[in-house]
Image: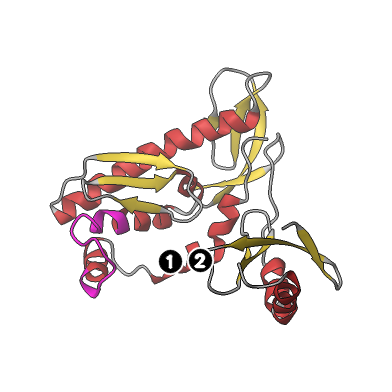
């Protein structure tokens, strides 16, 4: 249906989409790029849709004010690793080198973003394997595989056949946050729901997790805002 403009300071582009399955207006502000999208039922007009958008202007602008801008990867950029800021530097040699305050990327090699992404995935796989083994041992349950993905909607998942999936971007989060997500998914090996029994299991094998859940809610979008590829 195209793009409309919500007037104001600044003007906000709004993408209108129609869905035969929609029963009401649905407004979404993307955490990834800040795009505002309104989904309309088939029977609704664009005028009605934009009237709804204007009613929600305060909410839209609040969401946009909290939006985290996208960050590219280049020498001199700063990204977190296990919750600690590290500056990207160019170094001689063929290997990525991690130090207390820096991540050294080989100069003149492959694309810096792609090289860094590969390094982070490798570290994430090692950390999640360590954490999942630890918490599965506490639960006396076995998982069948560990998979790493770059999902936007969830930080982890557990299948009925015991496969644990994690977002590799969590290697950039504080270690206790990564450990919490590992324990959360391992707990699903016993409870495939979010019942009180499930949360009791999380607390038994991990401990209190309110701070870690709050970190993901408050700061998780910053991890998704880092772009490793053009």
- Residue toward you, 37 or 188: 37
- Residue toward you, 135 or 44: 44
- Residue toward you, 132 or 31: 31
| Quarter of the view holding residue 206 | bottom left
Distance between the Cα atoms at labels 1 and 2? 6 Å
Percent position of residue 120, x then y: 49, 37
Residue depicted at 21% across the width and 65% down the height: 201
Residue depicted at 65% across the width and 26% down the height: 111
Which mark identifies residue 213?
1
Are the two marked residues, 1 and 2, in contact with CB atoms closer than 8 angstroms? yes
- Residue toward you, 137 or 19: 19
Q: Which residues are magenta?
A: 184-197
Percent position of residue 183, x then y: 29, 56
Image check: 131 left or right of 173? Answer: left
Q: On screen, 183 above or below 106?
A: below
Residue depicted at 42% across the width and 64% down the height: 212
Percent position of residue 126, x then y: 36, 37
Q: Check the image and name the residue furthest to the bottom.
A: 55
Question: Dot 1, how many residues are within 10 Å of its Cα: few (below 14), some (14-19), or many (20+)?
Answer: some
Percent position of residue 217, x then y: 50, 66
Per the image, is 111 magenta?
A: no
Q: Check the image and name the residue furthest to the front.
A: 43
> From the image, which quarter does the N terminus lie in?
bottom right
| Quarter of the view holding residue 51 | bottom right
Residue placed under numbered mark 2 in the picture: 217
Q: Secondary structure at mark 1?
A: helix
> From the image, which quarter does the C terminus lie in?
top right
Q: Check the image and name the residue furthest to the left.
A: 140
């Amino acid at each position: 249906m195209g793009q409309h403009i919500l007037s104001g300071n600044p003007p906000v582009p709004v993408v209108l989409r129609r869905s035969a399955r929609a029963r009401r207006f649905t407004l979404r502000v993307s955490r990834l790029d800040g795009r505002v999208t309104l989904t309309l039922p088939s029977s609704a007009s664009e005028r009605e849709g934009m009237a709804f958008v204007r009613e929600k202007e305060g909410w839209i602008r609040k969401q946009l004010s909290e939006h985290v801008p996208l960050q590219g990867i280049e020498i001199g950029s700063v990204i977190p690793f296990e919750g600690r800021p590290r500056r990207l530097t160019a170094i001689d040699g063929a290997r990525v080198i991690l130090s207390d305050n820096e991540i050294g990327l080989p100069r003149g090699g492959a694309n810096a973003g792609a090289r860094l992404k590969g390094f982070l995935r490798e570290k994430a796989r090692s950390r999640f394997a360590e954490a999942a083994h630890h918490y599965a041992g506490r639960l006396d349950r076995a998982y069948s595989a560990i998979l790493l993905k770059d999902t936007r909607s969830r930080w982890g998942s557990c299948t009925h056949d015991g496969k644990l999936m994690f977002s590799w971007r969590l290697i950039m989060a504080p270690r206790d946050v990564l450990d919490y997500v590992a324990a959360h998914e391992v707990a699903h090996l016993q409870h495939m729901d979010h019942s009180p029994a499930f949360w009791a299991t999380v607390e038994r094998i991990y401990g209190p997790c309110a701070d870690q859940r709050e970190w993901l809610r408050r700061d998780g979008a910053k991890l998704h805002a880092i772009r490793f590829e053009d």
